[in-house]
Image (cartoon, rainbow, N blue to C red):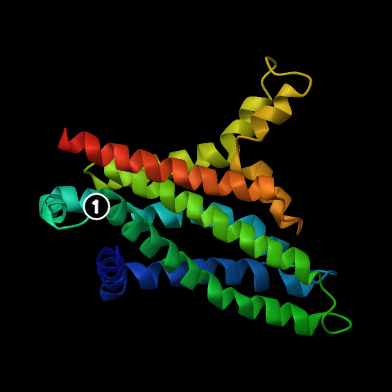
Amino acid sequence: MLTIFSKEIKAFFSSLIGYIVIGVFLLVTGLMMFVFPDTSLLDSSYATMDQLFALAPIIFMFLIPAVTMRSFAEENQTGTIELLATRPLRDIEIVLGKFLASLILVLIALIPTLFYYYSIHQLGSPVGNLDSGAIMGSYIGLFLLAGVYTAIGVFASSLIDNQIVSFILATFLCFFMYWGFLFLSKLPVFFGKTDILVQMFGIDYHYSSISRGVLDTRDLIYFLSVIALFVAMTLVSLEKRKW
């Protein structure tokens, strides 16, 4: 697994992929938090990072599929998937290596946003007047969300040889998993408490809960279960190619 992990990390930073992903994420979030007047912290009366945690899931919905679309699609296009399969590596090691490499790249993009936290901490009146617990919970939720998006992206890449189609499919699946169940719960066929049950299948319900600073084990289990589900489906997809 470490071999695949290091190979993928080197591939990200030996090309422009890693730098573009990190640069675009920081540029967009920086503009939203400090430049655009409707969302700028400098024009706000409260010391908060809600802008970042509300915007990041939407940005990740496009950036993470762009990172993961090459995971298996490129291997299939170039024919190196056969070489990879002949190495003394289990399928789970290959999948986890690619999954963790993409997730680490997203984590590297998140680390510089701690500067936003420091800025808000210093701008508060008095200094440090912000809810650090809620911010920490939101960071945990955002990292778990990135894990789900990454697992979805790797799964989509394993299904399709074309990287562009893989990107589109992964973006759609991320969108559906985040908001799809919320929209479905609004249908008139769901009434009483059934609409809440439908919403609980979606990411938005659990991400919003963690973003309030409440680390509920049910939310953690949900995120880890969805990641495990898509990793398992990726393994099935690889096995199906062998069949």
Is 239 placed above or below 44 here?
above
Left or right for 198, reference 65: right
Q: Is residue 236 left or right of residue 48?
A: left
Measured as percent of width and height from the top left, residue 55 is found at: 61, 57
Which residue lies at the image location 59% right of the left edge and 74% below the top edge? Answer: 113
| Residue 32 in the image, given as x and y percentages of width and height | 63, 66
> Which quadrant would residue 12 be assigned to in this image?
bottom left
The residue pinned by badge 1 equals 90
Q: In the figure, residue 3 lies in which quadrant?
A: bottom left
Task: Give how far across and how far down residue 163 sits, in percent.
Answer: 26, 48
In the image, residue 43 above or below residue 90: below
**Is any part of residue 37 visible from this angle?**
no
- In the image, what residue occupies the spot 55% across and 77% down? 112
Residue 94, image x and y in percent? 27, 55
Closer to the camera in the image, 72 or 179: 72
Q: What amino acid type is highlighted by mark number 1?
A: Arg
Let me know if residue 147 appears in the view.
Answer: yes
Q: Secondary structure at mark 1?
A: loop
Which residue does the image show at 44% across and 62% down from the upper left?
Answer: 103
Query: Does 35 sit above or below residue 237?
Result: below
Choose top left, top right, bottom left or bottom right for residue 235. Answer: top left
Tell whether 10 sits left or right of 152: left
